[in-house]
Image (cartoon, rainbow, N blue to C red):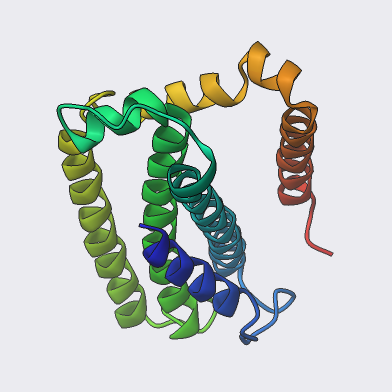
Amino acid sequence: MWHTAIFLSGSAVAGLFVKTTPTMQTASTAERWVRISYFLLVFFTFLLAMNVTVLASAAFLATKNTMTYDPMATSAFDLLQREFLYELAVTRWSFEVALLFFIASVLLRIMFEFELIGKTSTKKQKTFAGALLLFGSSLICHLVSYMNTRIYRWGNIWSLTIDVIKMIASTNNLSTHPLAAISLILGALGALFTGKAISMPQV
């Protein structure tokens, strides 16, 4: 899993720093929103993919070097959820959400890179944009549906999301690891600043 996560993070970084035209100042309102959504999706893809890489690597090294645990289990999944429940939940959630974000970001990048939306877009180009949205949405819905049939402990990605939030925000985790509390505060502030920036008028 972490090999794919490394690919996602590398692709996300590449997507963030590729210069595109026209600039945000000359773009239409629709294109501006697509570009903002694209950069946010790529940025969060990078963050989540890096989270997968670090957690999966740490869990793997723990099994090889430092951690004492009972290796006996009826299946590999039972072993993971018994000994590495936090790593299993957060890694799986981060990877699947990063993958969905990456697909959505590629879709948005195609839309503005090939000028399918914008002030100068023709009716034909806008029709192609609509077709891309439908194809992309179809794939995302299919993947989410498939993911929900393979999340054995939680049943679906929504229950997994709630469990991950509870794990990260648990009192025990925050009291034992103060940096986890700082991380939550910084994340909340980041979301606040993002919302504030989006609501500001374009000057």
Task: Examine the rendering and report whether any part of residue 117 can be seen.
Answer: no
Location of residue 100 in the rendering, given as x and y in whole percent from the top left corner:
37, 54
Task: Examine the rendering and report whether any part of residue 113 can be seen.
Answer: yes
- Left of 186 or right of it: where is 55? left
For the residue pair 30 and 83, the one nearer the viewer reads as: 83
Name the residue located 35 percent from the left edge and 80 percent from the top edge.
Answer: 125
Q: In which quarter of the view is residue 31 placed?
A: bottom right
Name the residue located 46 percent from the left edge and 31 percent from the top edge.
Answer: 68
Hey, which residue is sitting farthest right in the picture?
A: 203
Up-down: is 39 above or below 86? below
The total number of labels drawn is 0
Up-down: is 13 above or below 46? below
Quarter of the figure with the N terminus: bottom left
- Left of 40 or right of it: where is 83? left
Location of residue 35 in the rendering, given as x and y in whole percent from the top left corner:
58, 67
Q: In which quarter of the view is residue 179 placed?
A: top right
Location of residue 38 in the rendering, given as x and y in whole percent from the top left corner:
54, 64
Location of residue 46 in the rendering, given as x and y in whole percent from the top left corner:
56, 61
For the residue pair 35 and 141, the one nearer the viewer reads as: 141
Up-down: is 115 above or below 164? below
Quarter of the figure with the C terminus: bottom right
Name the residue located 27 percent from the left edge and 52 percent from the top edge.
Answer: 140
Q: In which quarter of the view is residue 161 placed?
A: top left
For the residue pair 90 and 128, the one nearer the viewer reads as: 90
Name the residue located 47 percent from the left edge and 44 percent from the top edge.
Answer: 59
